[in-house]
Image (tube, helix red, strand yellow):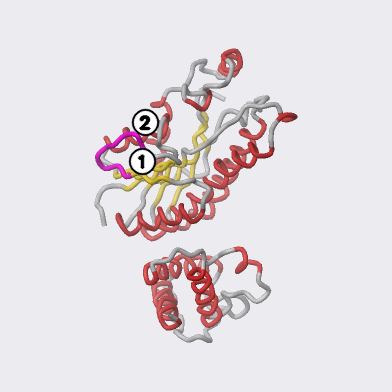
């Protein structure tokens, strides 16, 4: 069994996911990441899988290889997610299915398979991604906000189900961060959103890793089922 | 194949007896009632049994299967009732997996 902490991060091809890979490998973690495309970078102590997070066979295969290669899994960060801003009256069903599959089904599958490995050591940390769009009830984000509301419920319920196995499950709800996810959203919409935060600025990648660092500290083993929103929501 | 599956389930029974610190070890017999009325393990024990066995089957046959699939959960006669029904169910799943 490998002696350093093993961490899985989904959605690592770019943006927050890629930043988290760099952050945690630099802290000495063995990081396994995945995305639909090949990684366009290579970092020591990083292994990349090419898969769709809602494809059960592919996901199971990845976790099976992690178990065989590393013999342990300490942390899961369910970062993969997609959004689509649209009025409900012109939202295609294909978009709805895609968002729910990636954000909800993908998060569920990763939690399930990760917990099977974590259970063995009676220790594990799962961090899911929520969003401020849910408590702020943002217009145009009906499906995205709903999918993340489901992630919040999933987080809080499985926090209880997995507590017997020494696994904590928490979520972080980021404010807008300048990534591809918000690239197509008009500036005035983003400004209006940010004005609803207590601290009126875009989030930075380090704001996110700071919360994750807190959740995964050994001393945080009494913290579970919590959703921390950035920016003061 | 059947015997290998049976052995995997027996190994899981030993592991569970140890992990759950059961006073009476789970009997390694096809007739052992696992779950339900007069079953030997509770729901958490069943979860552990399924996860452990899934892993052992994966290692033994180099095949990835989901033991708690929709069919298993909705069957009137639960495949998790006895060791025998559990082994039969895994055998069927593996055969189907081979034919995929």
| Secondary structure at numbered mark 2 | helix
Q: Position of residue B81 (x, y in %)?
A: 58, 77
Q: Quadrant of residue B76?
A: bottom right
Q: Position of residue B96 (x, y in %)?
A: 53, 71
Q: Position of residue A227 (x, y in %)?
A: 53, 37
| Rendered-image quadrant of the C terminus of chain A | top right
Report if the CB atoms under discs 2 and 1 are less than 8 Å apart: no
**Dominant secondary-structure state across the stretch colored magenta:** loop
Q: Name the residue at 52% across, 30% down.
A: A229
Q: Nearer the viewer, residue A169 or B73?
A: B73
Circle 1 sits on which residue? A217
Q: Name the residue at 30% across, 47% down.
A: A5
Mark-to-mark CA distance, 2 and 1: 19 Å
Give the extent of the magenta segment. A39-47
Q: Nearer the viewer, residue A64 or A148?
A: A64
Q: Name the residue at 57% across, 40% down.
A: A152
Q: Which mark is residue A19?
A: 2
Residue A152 is covered by the magenta coloring: no
């Amino acid at each position: 069994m490998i002696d350093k902490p093993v961490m899985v991060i989904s959605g690592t091809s770019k943006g927050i996911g890629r930043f988290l890979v760099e952050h945690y490998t630099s802290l000495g973690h063995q990081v396994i990441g995945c995305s639909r495309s090949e990684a366009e970078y290579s970092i020591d102590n990083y292994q990349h899988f090419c898969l769709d997070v809602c494809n059960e066979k592919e996901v199971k295969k990845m976790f099976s290889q992690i178990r065989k290669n590393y013999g342990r899994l300490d942390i899961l960060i369910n970062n993969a997610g997609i959004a689509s801003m649209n009025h409900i009256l012109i939202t295609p069903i294909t978009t709805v299915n895609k968002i729910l599959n990636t954000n909800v089904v993908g998060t569920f599958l990763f939690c399930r398979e990760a917990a099977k490995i974590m259970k063995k050591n009676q220790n594990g940390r799962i961090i899911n991604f929520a969003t401020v769009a849910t408590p702020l009830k943002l217009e145009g984000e009906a499906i995205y906000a709903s999918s993340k509301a489901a992630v919040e419920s999933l987080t809080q319920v499985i926090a209880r189900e997995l507590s017997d196995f020494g696994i904590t499950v928490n979520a972080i709800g980021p404010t807008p961060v300048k990534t591809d996810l918000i690239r197509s959203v008009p500036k005035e919409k983003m400004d209006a959103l940010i004005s609803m935060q207590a601290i009126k600025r875009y989030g930075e990648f380090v704001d996110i890793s700071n919360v994750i660092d807190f959740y995964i500290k050994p001393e945080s083993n009494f913290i579970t089922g919590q959703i921390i929103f950035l920016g003061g929501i | 194949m059947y015997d290998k599956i049976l052995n995997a389930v027996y190994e899981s029974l030993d592991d569970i007896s140890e992990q759950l610190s059961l006073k009476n070890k789970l009997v390694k017999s096809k007739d052992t009632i696992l779950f339900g009325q007069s079953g030997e393990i509770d729901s958490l024990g069943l979860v552990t049994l399924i996860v452990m066995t899934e892993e052992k089957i994966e290692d033994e046959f180099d095949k990835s299967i989901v033991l708690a699939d929709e069919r298993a959960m909705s069957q009137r006669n639960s495949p998790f009732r006895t060791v025998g029904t559990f082994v039969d169910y895994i055998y069927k799943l593996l055969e189907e997996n081979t034919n995929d």
